[in-house]
Image: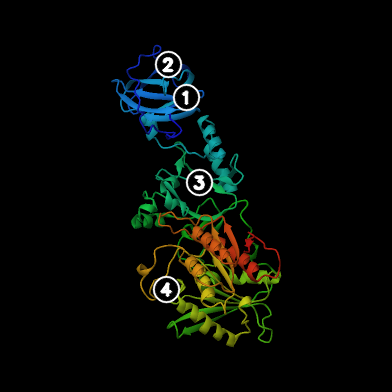
Amino acid sequence: MAAKRLSRMAWLVLISISISSIPSFASDIGLAVGEAREGRVSAGRPQSFVILFNSEDYAEIKIDPRGKQLAVILYDPSGSKFRGGTIGPGEDRSGFTVEGPGAYRLEVAGSDKTIEGTFTITLEKIVPLAARLARPKPLLESPRIQALRASLESGKPGTIDAFWREVQKEGAPIIEPLAGDNDNMLVTFLWRGTPDTHNVFVARLPYAAATPDDYFMNRLDQSDVWYKTFAISRKARFEYSLAPNVPKLQAISFGIDNEAIAMIAAAARTDPLNPNLWRLDKRSLDSPEYQGRSIVEMPDAPAQPWVVETPGVPAGHIEKRRFKSALLKNEREIAIYLPPGYSRNNKAYPLLVLFDELAYLGDPEGVVLVPTPTILNNLIAAKRIPPMVALLVDNAAGARDRELLCNPAFSDFLSSELLPWAHGLYSLTTDPRQTVVGGSSLGGMAATCAGFHHPETFGNILSQSGAYHRTPPKTEGAPGTDADSEPNWIAKKVIASAKQPLRFYLDAGSEEIDVTGGGSSILLTNRTLRDVLLAKGYEVHFQEFAGGHDYLSWRGTLADGLITLIGCATTNPGQEPTAVKP
């Protein structure tokens, strides 16, 4: 009923011709839902149809003009022209909403007086206002939930109790195939409600922040089963929590509702039906259900074999020292990993410098996010990397944003203070080709900048979800508001600079997208930097993992980056980053 140039769901323009004064070719024909009708136009004479509507009904009509161009006008019960358009020569359908009740007349004619022939018209649906305002039917639904609903409607006794016994045994969320989709699966989160349960929010970022209404669970009839089903990549690994009885939340693109977020955070807890947890703090005084996060590892999520302590694998040694910087005028802790069998008398060891010591070392009595010593032990034992020393650099108090945001003074501190100090204590390489500098998020950006500021020191850059959407202040020491607001600042610097002897491992997650509308996509800016580096002739290894901005993925990709940049083997395990050379 609409031309191809019109929207499928609305009549957007009125045709310029009028056929209201032309007498009907035949008596008006009534249209009923689901019934196809034949019509005929001839020598400028229209075919008329009548449809009965209630106020605010939505109708959808399909017309097959059989190779002709037809003019279509709808008249309201008073006889006034209401909507109109042209259609043809191909079949099309369109919808419209009426404003008042009564009999509406639909006239179909050739778009000019020379056109004649037959056509088919079908009133496919009429949707009342009440149905349109009802809670939307889920586009995806778990077969398990569908079967439970059918059993419940049949009146089979014990249906709900049997369901919960199965879930307690098998765990949640429920993961099922998605028909016709080889890339995603259905994931259904569950909550066993009580008479006091009014809603349940699935706190899975970033998506829950983008469309929060879509992350509230549905209730199965009047039962205690609350559920929500999503299509999620077979390769995904992610964390989430569940929050019952929380306020509605605006999409983050409208701004940040700190009060609502605080109440959701206070109610959020781990999934009682999911035994897979992480971020657990052994020293926490909080109740167990409020500690850590629940995690889901989909069937094709890349293995993370290097993060597990393996019996019989020799362990390196950790030393912790304090370091005062004359350049930065502050003090911090440096954790030094020495590989198994380390000796000052051996030849100089390759070196890894990693930022955010607390995340990459952690505390075995508290929280360990990325177990770097374990990863290094396993990789060295498997001969995937050579024995190497690692400096895990802590952040000085209150200085992380200032120092890691591509600050030249911080890069100078690393090259002219920290590494000379470490060389005086340990047997370390001075060859930039055997030196890796790395970090995640802002630490990834700092690693890239350290390489460009001092390529004579750092030859290999390991960046995990580098925060390249961030921009440093235009003036050193100025507040963040002094920064250039355009992302890809570092990419522009690469374009403007001469090529340096640097190699890169970059990664980013498929879920590291911009949900604010402000252009701050980590995924997009990492892709852009990759392309710019390649265009400048750099060797770049890029990996895009199915996950978000979190250590849950980075604990696996750290090993990938090390094997890629300094590995002993020619093949890469795990997620196998793409090796791209110009």
Residue position marked by numbered label 2 in the rendering: 43
Marks 2/1 in contact by CB < 8 Å: the verdict is no
Furthest residue in direction top, as rendered: 27
The image shows residue 330 at horizontal and vertical percentages of 43, 82
Estimate how packed mark 2 is, as few (under 14), some (14 to 19) or many (20 or more) residues with alpha carbons within 10 Å.
Answer: few
- Report the Cα–Cα distance between label 4 and label 2: 78 Å
Residue 312 appears in the rendering: no
> On the rendered structure, is 117 left or right of 506?
left
Image quarter of residue 477? bottom left
Marks 3/2 in contact by CB < 8 Å: the verdict is no
- Label 4 vs label 1, nearer the camera: 1
Residue position marked by numbered label 1 in the rendering: 63
The image shows residue 258 at horizontal and vertical percentages of 35, 58
Q: Quadrant of the N terminus?
A: top left
> Sequence-wise, which precedes: disc 2 or disc 1?
2
Marks 4/1 in contact by CB < 8 Å: the verdict is no
Residue at the (56%, 35%) spot, across then down:
147
- SS at mark 3 in the image: strand
Kind of residue at disc 2: Ala
Residue position marked by numbered label 4 in the rendering: 402
Q: Is residue 390 above or below residue 535?
A: below
